[in-house]
Image (cartoon, rainbow, N blue to C red):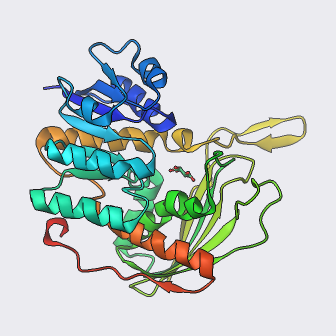
Amino acid sequence: MTLGIAVIGTGRMGADHVRRIETAVGGARVAAVADLDADRAAAVARGIKGCSVHTDPAAAMAAPGVDAVLIASSGPAHEAALLDAFARGLPVLCEKPLTPDPAGALRVMEAERRLGRRLVTVGFMRRYDAEYQDLQHTLRRGKLGRALMLHCRHRNAASPSFFTTEMLIRDSVVHEADATRWLLGQEITAVQVLRPRPSSYAPRDLGDPQLVLFETSGGAVVDVEIFVNCGFGYEVRCEAVCERGTASIGAGGGLVTRTTGRAGRAVPQDFTVRFAEAYDREVRAWVGAVRAGRAEGASAWDGYAAALVCEAGVRAQRSGERVEVRLPERPALYA
Ligand code: ISE
């Protein structure tokens, strides 16, 4: 059977996923798309046989041939779409963040628990990146000893016009919240945020860059430089400092050119390029799991845990204080 997918949200990420499902993922097709902007949705669906176009996410999910849902709308729209998908018993791949706030994530998780089975995969694509997977295996194998610290850098060329200081945490550092939990297999227990004088190239009122510190349940410390208007491109790095050595990813290999007295490599300009293969692998893995009736990847619990870390991060950002993260016990469904 070919899995019919309703794609909710046809902005940059949604359009990229539609193209991916149609060209790079076997066993699936785009059966419906929805976007508040009907013209944008129609443009994305053009040329896709049997793909219906909607402005209402619920109508797209109810369209003929829909077996699963991919949510790529903005974070605040995720909760309603997730609950609609649950009401129809449809499996969902939901772009990060699961919801921007922990209260919404908790409602989603509780609704899923009432159904008694995992329907949501959260699209934390770094879990599917070959370098991140290498790093995770290296740390888990233990040859380098215990991980003491992670140094992370997360840079975007420029932030979109709607970006706020809170979103540096909830939309960007949420990746490091998940990556830290996944790489170390530990929970984040406290967050601090240091704020240098903002770059004069950042939009007015945006506190950019910032330095975010996590403490973890296993006694590690993680620093994250988040800089969403670095100007030169998209760069995500991580160096693990362990008892017997270090391991680092994100230096950017690839073609080196030498010309007119300079040597250099291209820097990707955004995440759809830097993580293109990871997104391909993520969507393929999800489609494979849905077709086999299995759960895959980051769960609603992971989305909730990341949202709690981000909530603490936003409080730390505002107060300048160290804020503890209080994670409840993990429900059995997510064991
Ligand atoms: C964006 O939504 C992403 O998920 C990117 O990976 C991240 O680098 C960027 O800062 C976010 O706004």
Q: Quadrant of residue 197?
A: bottom right
Q: Is residue 1 above or below residue 238?
A: above
Residue 263: x and y in percent read 80, 43
Which quarter of the figure is the N terminus placed in?
A: top left
- Identify the residue at image location x=45%, y=76%: 144
Q: In the shown orientation, is residue 203 left or right of residue 304?
A: right
Q: Residue visible at 15% across and 41% down?
A: 88
Answer left or right for 165 relative to 105.
right
305 up-or-down from 202: above or below: below
Front residue of 158/277: it is 158
Q: Quadrant of residue 124?
A: bottom left
Can residue 302 be seen?
A: no
Residue 162: x %, y % from top left: 61, 48
Nearest to the observer: residue 208 or residue 128? 208
Residue extending furthest toward the right = 261
* Residue placed most toward the observer, 210 or 264: 210
List x then y, in percent, for residue 27: 22, 28
Q: Is residue 139 visible?
A: yes
Q: x, y percentage for residue 136?
A: 40, 64
Quadrant of the rendering where the C terminus is positioned: bottom left
The number of numbered badges drawn on the structure is 0
Query: What residue is at 38 percent from the left and 57 percent from the top?
Result: 99
